[in-house]
Image (cartoon, rainbow, N blue to C red):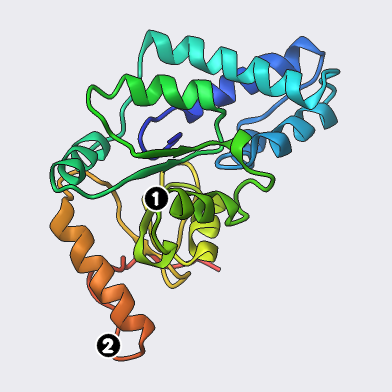
Amino acid sequence: MDGTIVNSEPYWMKAETDLIESFGGTWSHEEALTLVGQDMRHSARVMQAHGVALTEDEVIAHLTSQVQAQIEGEIPWRPGARELLEELRAAGIRTALVTMSIRPLAEHVVNSMGFDAFDVIVTGDDVAHGKPHPEAYLRAGELLGVDVAHCIAIEDSTPGVASAVASGAVTIGVPLFSPLYADRGYALWPTLENRGVADLVELFGAARTRDAGTTPRTSTDTETKDPA
């Protein structure tokens, strides 16, 4: 959700900065980037290590309330995300939202989309192990009643794509704040704008054929390379 459907990461970064500074600490943009896509409990422990004298649950509740207040003022939709979801729904394709945000925030965003976007919502408070662990995606497949290997996951962050790939889903990385690279087990799309069901079908078929070892990489895999 955060970073793929809505550009809410700046809201999280502001909430983290304000909270740490309220306890006399400092928080840099570079430090904030390390939490993009991470499990909320991991983020809470990082906040505590920077001097925030609150419990994990209190940190999560505080950050979520601050982000939700900002989102209620304006939801910064990511290009193409809602349009792709609408086309999927019109085609009768089942969808799941897999997010490390907690349920009240996820439901607020979903309810603001203007159509019935998801059959299933899996949030950070539904799983014992957050991203990059695959539990959330495996749970989504279970709730949809499908093998997750028959699913496509779309993610924007390093922990997110790691979670999706580990689950066995065909995975697309659409980078925003996290650097994502080719040849890491997922396809890279610069944006979801002007992408539709036909693009997903083509990608899925190419990915599964490659997994069988019969064809080389296709144009759906980006030319972006890992600088390392």
Q: Mark 2 vs mark 1: which is more N-terminal?
A: 1
Residue 126, given in percent of the width and then of the height, sits at 60, 38
- Which residue matches tag 2? 215
Front position in the image: 205 or 81? 205
Helix, strand or loop status at disc 1: helix
Indicate whether 6 appears above or below 205.
above
Q: Is residue 152 left or right of residue 179?
A: left
From the top left corner, tell me how far across and down residue 158 is, in percent. Answer: 53, 53
Q: Residue 144 at what x, y percent from top left?
A: 39, 50
Q: Residues within 10 Å of mark 1 (few under 14, many from 20)?
A: some
Q: Residue type at mark 1?
A: Leu
Q: CA distance from mark 2 to mark 1?
A: 30 Å
Q: Is residue 121 visible?
A: yes
Q: Label 1: which residue?
A: 144
On the question of residue 17 being in view, the answer is no
Task: Name the quadrant of the N terminus.
Answer: top left
Give the residue at x 23% y 50%: 93
Report whether 3 appears left or right of 61.
Answer: left
> Which mark is nearer the camera, 2 or 1?
1
Pick out the residue farthest to the bottom: 214
